[in-house]
Image (spheres, rainbow, N blue to C red):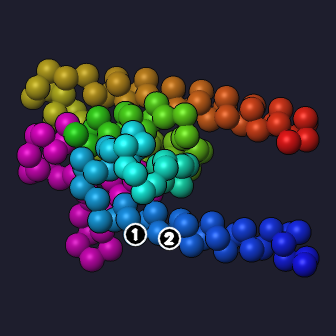
Amino acid sequence: MFGNILGKKKDNINADENSEIALRVSKMNLTEMRSFVNNRLNNFEITQAGLVEVMKKLTVSDEKTLKTYLQMDDMDSKKKKGFDLVIIIANSIHISVEAVELLQEFTLTYNDLIVKYDTEYKEIYASRFSDALVQSIENVNKYSELQRKRSVLGE
């Protein structure tokens, strides 16, 4: 009885759901991740945890190979799709503080790759990432303000 009141059962459900999302995202390619982030997959609705998992896949190095998802020698279309996906995530209304931190880590990890791509193809991804980071912080602030107002109203 107290477990239901204290929310312990809900935590177990959320942990199972997060592990299922992590497993699903780990098997996705860039096109599938884009569909997932844009809420076009039938099986899953995008959540904050889903955005975090996608950002982790793009940012964190693989434990076995110590390689990141995007490499300097990857095809340019893969780099562009990855960059566009991160910008979509940054502009999402579902973004969380953890996803913003991963966005910052993404720009630091791939800084050389971004600069090379920008100079080679006369793109402006470096400034687009800066603008997207500002937008994502604003979205997190709006979300936290909404949550604060909800808690005051008792919802």
Residue range of the region highlighted in magenta in the rendering: 53-80
- Specify the quadrant of the image occupied by residue 85: top left
Task: Tell me if residue 102 is in the magenta stretch.
Answer: no
Residue 101 in view in this figure: no
Q: Badge 2: how crowded within 10 Å, few (<14), some, or many (20+)? A: some
Residue at 29% across, 59% down: 28
Residue at 17% across, 53% down: 71
On residue 23, the disc is 1
Q: What residue is shown with label 2?
A: 19
> Whole-percent x and y of residue 24?
38, 65
Q: Are marks 1 and 2 in contact (CB under 8 Å)?
A: yes
Left or right of residue 50: residue 150 = right
In the rendered image, the quadrant that contains the N terminus is: bottom right
In the image, residue 42 above or below residue 84: below
The number of numbered discs placed on residues in the rendered structure image is 2
- Specify the quadrant of the image occupied by residue 150: top right
> Whole-percent x and y of residue 91?
46, 30
Q: Secondary structure at mark 1?
A: helix
Residue at 91% across, 41% down: 154
